[in-house]
Amino acid sequence: MLVDQSSLDDAGVFAHGRGEALVQTIDFFTPVVDDPYAFGQVAAANALSDVYAMGGRPLTALGVLCLPDDLPRTIVAEILRGGQDKMREAGASVIGGHSVRDPELKFGYAVTGVVKRRRLLTNAGARPGDRLLLTKPLGTGVLSTALKQGLLDAALARRVSRQMTVLNRVAAEAAVEFGARAATDVTGYGLIGHAQQMAMASGVSFHLRPHGNWLLPRVLEFAAAGVYPGGLDRNRDYYARDVGHGDLAEPLIRALYDPQTSGGLLLAVPRRRLAALLEALRRRRVWVRELGEVSRRGASAIELKRA
């Protein structure tokens, strides 16, 4: 066992074969978009993300489906078709799965991938002096909540849905190629939660300089109005005790705790390799922002400062 649950990493990693290892993960959830085909794509991209966050390549997947008795078969078929198409894009084979009756619809996958041990990325590799990068804008939880409340215009709803279906494959390949030292994907615990897990696993502190350009449009507006998922407050209740919030505005702080669906990668990269990785990501049309830097462990795992 190379990576287990003790470091709260994105997936388990088991040595298998000469110089290689298996990467295994599972993730499933309730719908975050209205369109069933898009929901299937989002669920697949989200499950695959854990493999990419380890620097791995997905091989196979098993579907996990919980469905109400009265759910029309046409909707189920579209969910499965969306997931299948996204898995095909990733080069992974869906080889089976399991379904159960449930009052609430849920869907996702258990994914198995492979990684060369020398290219393995974990959340425990960040070192003082590293720079921190993020590869997708934040705010999917806030905007999905606004969508459920009928507050989101059609164009922004399409943008959020499209972002959640984008695979982290290209970002992960660039991170491995250009020498990132550590990685995690930003999902249900929000940026702060996943950054804190990464900092604690690495024995360091992260110094972040939050900015509005880290966010999708209208996220600050909705966060200020109290339009956000219940998971945001739960994240804050749990993680805030090891965060120095500085004097940031309240809506921006809320956005940093927002639970994400199929979020981007949080990368720690040595300073000397930063420029090359940034250029590689931009050349490959990956959205990217520089968040701050890593230091020796201080009073808090996460220190927030004005940009």
Image (tube, helix red, strand yellow):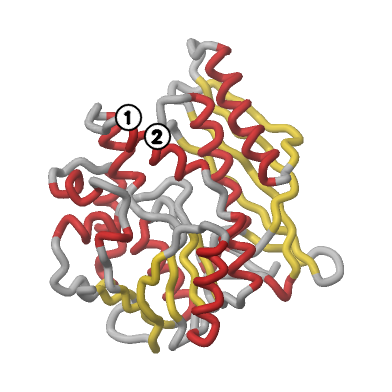
Count of marks, rendered view: 2
> Seen in the image, is 51 located left or right of residue 298?
right
The residue tagged 2 is 158
Tell me the quadrant of the picture where the N terminus can be found. Answer: bottom right
Q: Residue at x 56, y 13 (%)?
A: 74
Q: In which quarter of the image is residue 151?
A: top left
Circle 2 Cα neighbour tier, 10 Å, few/some/many (<14 / 14–19 / ≥20): few
Q: Which residue is drawn at 50% across and 24% down?
A: 36
SS at circle 2 = helix
Q: Relative to 168, is 62 above or below?
A: above
The residue tagged 1 is 154
> Residue 64's mark?
none
Kind of residue at disc 1? Ala
The one of 279 and 119 positioned closer to us in this rendering: 279
Percent x, y for residue 231?
Answer: 31, 47
Tell me the quadrant of the picture where the C terminus can be found. Answer: bottom left
The one of 89 and 204 positioned closer to us in this rendering: 89
Q: Do the residues labelled 1 and 2 touch (CB within 8 Å)?
A: yes
Q: Relative to 206, is 52 above or below?
A: above
Percent x, y for residue 172?
Answer: 59, 62
Q: In which quarter of the image is residue 206?
A: bottom left
Q: Relative to 268, is 184 above or below?
A: above
Q: Residue at x 50, y 31 (%)?
A: 38
Percent x, y for residue 190?
Answer: 36, 56
Kind of residue at disc 2? Arg
In space, the residues marked 1 and 2 are separated at their CA atoms by: 6 Å
Q: Residue at x 68, y 32 (%)?
A: 97
Percent x, y for residue 302?
Answer: 32, 74
> Seen in the image, is 81 located left or right of residue 260?
right
